[in-house]
Image (tube, rainbow, N blue to C red):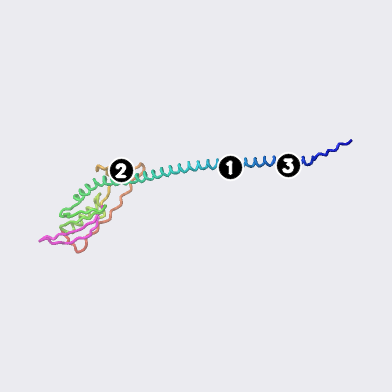
Amino acid sequence: MPRINLLPWREEQRKQRLKNFGVAAAAAVALGVAGVLYAHATVNRFIAHQNARNKYLETEIATLDKQIAEIKELESTKERLLARMQIIEQLQRSRPEVVHLFDELVRRLPDGVYLKSVKQTGNKLSIKGVAQSSTRVSALMRNIDASEWLTDPGLDVVETVEQGRARNSEFTIFASQVSHAGYGLGGVEETPKVEEGKKAAPAKPKPAPTPPKKGAEGGQ
């Protein structure tokens, strides 16, 4: 005889499918939650690592900025010290030049000429004096033009002044002081070094002194 299954097998099969679907859905949800948590943890780890790197870079940048500020301050201090050294060196060089200047004025002063004042502004000189005649003033200008320490003589004023029976010429002469860089701090002349195969450039001729103004007294 044939066997007939009268049990509700379709209902059982449906329940089994629902059960399997539930298990699969739960597993999928669990896997999804686990993936989200892993991704969140990974992103947080990357963010923390980047924040640590940023903090390290900010610290190093602050250190470099501080070092740069110190370097700038040192460079400023160096420039100030170099400027002071240059000023001191110029003053040291000018000390023997003053002595040579006054010695040169005495040497170049012709007979019959007396100086009243000598004023120096930078390398410019203003010389005031009295001469027995305008010819002696011209002689003084020629002597200044021939000097190694003075140059560019120019006559500003020459006036004839009567003093009793004598008639003298009061004058004002301008000149420039020549700076000799070859003189050391102690006033000793240093011979400049010339490279082999090179010759020193010829000296430029000095301009002729300015003649006295017309109307001045002549004769000695």
Who comes first in sequence, dot 3 or dot 1? 3
What amino acid is found at the position of numbered circle 1 in the picture? His
Q: Is 17 positioned to the left or the right of 79 in the image?
A: right
Q: Quadrant of the N terminus?
A: top right
In this view, the residue farthest toward the front is 6
Q: Quadrant of the C terminus?
A: bottom left
Q: Nearer the viewer, mark 3 or mark 2?
A: 3
Q: Are marks 3 and 2 in contact (CB under 8 Å)?
A: no
Dot 3: element? helix
Q: Is 62 positioned to the left or the right of 39 in the image?
A: left
Crowd band around label 1 with a 10 angstrom C-alpha radius: few (<14), some (14–19), many (20+) = few
Percent coordinates x, y for residue 195 in the rendering: 35, 42
Q: Residue at x 26, y 43 (%)?
A: 185
Percent coordinates x, y for residue 45 in the rendering: 55, 40
Q: Nearer the viewer, mark 3 or mark 1?
A: 3
Percent coordinates x, y for residue 207 in the rendering: 28, 55
> Residue beneath label 1, please?
40
Residue range (magenta): 153-176
Q: Main secondary structure of the magenta part?
A: strand
Asked if the magenta segment contains residue 109, the reply would be no
Who comes first in sequence, dot 3 or dot 2? 3
Dot 1: element? helix
Q: Nearer the viewer, residue 219 or 130?
A: 130
> Residue beneath label 3, please?
18
In this view, the residue farthest toward the top is 1
Who comes first in sequence, dot 2 or dot 1? 1
What amino acid is found at the position of numbered circle 3 in the picture? Leu
> Residue beneath label 2, please?
192
